[in-house]
Amino acid sequence: MRFVPVKSEAAQASALVFRTRDLLVRQCTQLINALRGHMTEFGIVVAQGPMHITKLVAVVGDPASSLPEPARAVLDVLIAELRALDERVAKLDVEIVRRAKEDAVARRLMTIPGIGAITATALVALAPAAATFRRGRDFAAWLGLTPMQRSSGGKERLGPTSRMGERTLRRLLMVGASAVAGWASRKGVAPGSWLAGMMARKPPMLVRVALANKMGRMVSALPAHDGVYRAPAMAV
């Protein structure tokens, strides 16, 4: 049997801050989707994504727009609630950054490319101690970032990622891996590096999953060895 160590009050407080922020972000997404859906019924359509919501807000605030006044009054309520949630999320972001800077483990985790204050705080608060896992791959498997084994008869068959672990941490690592892969595709990556080889051979989504897996193994290794991330030297 594997026993989970009791978390300290500080770790529980960090988890509470992160969970509260995660809840508010989901509520923001619900409001954005509701606003887009209601505006679509009046023939006003914008692209998906939070960055385009300002266009809808401008249409609602424009008296010359074709929106009926009763609908405009209700949509103003949604916009006011969305702005209030954005302010609360911003305050929690400041608190998360402060906690990340004060935590030694979080500071080491933030040296890994793709891991910022929010992800580092979530890892410290939600992930078990590194000593719980025998190796980094076990931690990646706990996150659900390893392929499912469907081998039989001496033939190795690997399926899709298991997605059997902590979905919040898995999502954050996938977001970080997507950011790193996107930056590498735009700015270029060092020839001969692991990421360059993966991007040359594999489809983009597989590269992101593999990079998230690699980040998870780094996350497991750094606290165990009290080290920081160092970029690997390129072979000449």
Image (spheres, rainbow, N blue to C red):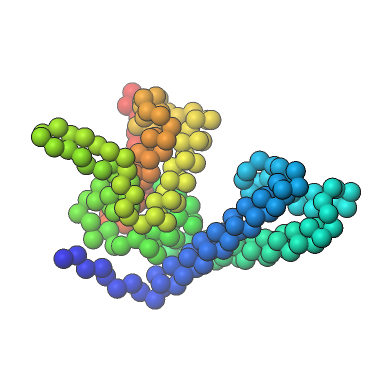
Above/below status of 223 relative to 66 = below
Above/below status of 12 relative to 53 = below
Question: Which quadrant holds residue 158?
Answer: top left
Query: Looking at the image, which is closer to me, 132 or 27?
Result: 27
Report the side of 18 relative to 75 (left or right): left
Residue occupying the point 37% across, 28% down: 202
Query: Looking at the image, which is closer to me, 87 or 151?
Result: 151
User: Residue furthest toward the right?
Assistant: 64
Residue occupying the point 66% across, 46% down: 51
Report the side of 119 relative to 158 (left or right): right
Query: Looking at the image, which is closer to me, 98 or 135?
Result: 135
Question: How many numbered marks have been drawn onto this rendered protein structure?
Answer: 0
Residue 166 place in picture, x, y as percent:
36, 57
Report the side of 92 relative to 41 (left or right): left
Residue 219 place in picture, x, y as percent:
34, 52
> What is the quadrant of the N terminus in the image?
bottom left
Residue 63 place in picture, x, y as percent:
88, 53
Residue occupying the point 33% across, 23% down: 236
Above/below status of 1 relative to 115 = below
